[in-house]
Amino acid sequence: MTAQTLTAPARLRCWVPRGVYSPQADTGLLRRAMCRERIAPGRTEILDLGTGSGLLAVEAARRGGRVTAVDISWRAVLTTWWNARLNGQSVRVRHGDLASAVPGRRFDLVVTNPPYVPAPVTAPPRGPARAWDAGTDGRMVIDRICEAAPTVLRPAGTLLLVHSHLCGVDDTLTRLAAAGLYGEVVDRARLPYGHVLRSRLAWLRERGLTARGTTEELVVIRAEHA
């Protein structure tokens, strides 16, 4: 177990135990996009779907949002609760499967960093891999979020979603449009493959998901009701 300090856009303390997704480049990219959104202190209702360590939820609370964080992992739920306390912030933490954990509620801002790594096995992932493995096309969770987003967004609400180009940026925009949302890419970052993708490089090339390169592009998609 380690305590990490992230410095941009503001310092937050983040405790990450074994088995919980540690904040990485995708977290930072989504955090930056979230910090550009208008958050009215004490009024803006924010939902963090698949909160992991809770870093984004804590940042949103630090900026004045009324934050609810959701994760299917009990360990992530407890980690988020602790990181909120560690930073002196108030976050409502719920255990559950995506939007089913907040039935009937709607939010001004929904942020999510879902599992999106293509995996060579079709069985649901177990253990820590639940934080990144998402089926053979990487869309096991993303498609569910696109479908559920209109049910948790207020009429003027905003969705911020981060994922890799490997699972299809255009596919996400098309899914959001089918659900009645207009989406666009508002941030991009290119970085070298991490350990998991490097270990699957031959399989990714065989599937046609990547060419000769060993870098991926992360994107943040911002969506609103059309």
Image: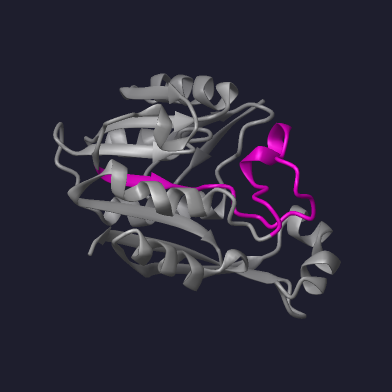
Q: Give how far across and how far down residue 109 sits, in percent.
A: 27, 46
Task: Residue 150: say if magenta.
Answer: no
Q: Is residue 8 visible?
A: no
User: Residue furthest toward the bottom?
Assistant: 212
Q: Give how far across and how far down residue 180 sits, in percent.
A: 29, 61
| 62 to the left or right of 6 | left
Identify which residue, 148 or 53, lies in the foreground: 148
Residue at 27%, 56% (x, y): give it.
36
| 179 to the left or right of 205 | left
Q: Is residue 125 visible?
A: yes
Identify which residue, 69 or 34, lies in the foreground: 69
User: In what quadrant of the picture does the N terminus appear?
Assistant: top right
Q: Is residue 146 above or below residue 12?
A: below
Q: Give how far across and how far down residue 196 sits, in percent.
A: 76, 53
User: Residue furthest toward the front?
Assistant: 178
| 95 to the left or right of 197 | left
User: In what quadrant of the picture does the C terminus appear?
Assistant: bottom left
Q: Is residue 146 above or below residue 124?
A: below
**Image quadrant assignment for residue 212:** bottom right
Which stretch is magenta? 108-136
Residue at 30%, 50% (x, y): give it.
150
Q: Give how far across and how far down residue 144 sits, in percent.
A: 48, 48
- Number of disc labels: 0
**Image quadrant assignment for residue 217:** bottom right
Identify which residue, 28 or 172, lies in the foreground: 172
